[in-house]
Amino acid sequence: MERLAEQLRAVIVATDDYRRAMASALGVGVHEAAVMGELLHEGPLPPSALVKRLGIASASVTALLDRLEVAGFTRRERHPTDRRSVLVVLTPVGRAAIEATFGLFRDDVHQSVKRSEPGHIREFTDVLAKIAQALRERAAQPASIGDALTERVRSAGALTDRTAGPAG
């Protein structure tokens, strides 16, 4: 299991490098590319949903959306049911650009596993889905993450009672 976790970490690191390279090739930052990916997969979204998804300040998302609009990848449209809100949508150029990156990603993944047995690929896909679900569930419980980390650090002997947990 430890080797599995190490290899999954290696995939995550490689994926981060891959995302940076793809974003750079598009002439945008990683967050901008992430927004384009969200819009491709989820459809038009209000800026507030992008703030939540990216975990950055709303002012940062506003500047990011401005950059994507200037590049011609997105535009803001009036929300059809909420006059106070807008939706961010991909332009045809933005859609073509982000679809091309996901197409290249699919091709690269396919090339890496094409000599594997189809049954192994199905099983591996199922395992990845289970890992993704477990990580989403853990991420949805930030307090439990803090508790688990504190306990692990304490068990390793790195914390004393005086230094345990955040300062109050």
Image (cartoon, grey):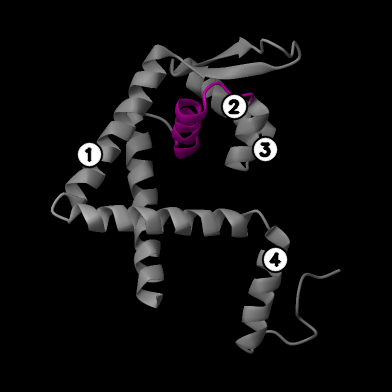
Q: Earlier in the sequence, mark 2 or mark 4?
A: 2
Q: Position of residue 166 (x, y in %)?
A: 77, 70
Residue linked to disc 3: 57
Label disc, if present, on residue 63 of the rendered structure: 2
Mark 1 Cα-neighbour bin, 10 Å: few <14, some 14–19, many ≥20: few
Q: Nearer the viewer, residue 167 or 49?
A: 49
Neighbor class of circle 3 (other Cα within 10 Å; few <14, some 14-19, many 20+) is: few
- Looking at the image, tell me whether mark 4 or mark 3 is earlier in sequence order: 3
- How crowded pointer 2 is (Cα within 10 Å; few <14, some 14-19, many 20+) is rated as few
User: Decide: marks 1, 2 in contact (CB < 8 A)?
Assistant: no
The residue that appears at 46% across and 28% down in the rendered structure is 36
Quadrant of the rendered image containing residue 103: top left
- Could you tell me the amino acid type at mark 4? Ser
In contact (CB < 8 Å): disc 4 and disc 1: no
Q: Which residue is mark 1?
A: 107
Q: Residue furthest front?
A: 119
Specify start and end residues of the magenta stretch as a single range: 29-46
In reply to whether residue 43 is colored magenta, the answer given is yes
Residue type at tag 3 = Ala
Please tell me which residue is depicted at 39% across the width and 50% down the height of the picture. Answer: 16
Q: CA distance from mark 2 to mark 4?
A: 33 Å
* Residue picked out by circle 4: 144
Left or right of residue 118, residue 102 in this image = right
Using the rendered image of the protein, determine whether residue 158 is visible from the camera's viewpoint.
no
Name the chief secondary structure element in magenta. helix
Residue type, label 2: Ala
Type of amino acid at the residue the image marks with label 1: Asp
| Quarter that holds the N terminus | bottom left
Mark 1 and mark 3 in contact? Answer it, CB < 8 Å: no
Would you identify the image quadrant in which residue 96 lies? top left
- Mark carried by residue 168: none
Indicate the secondary structure of the residue bearing disc 2.
helix
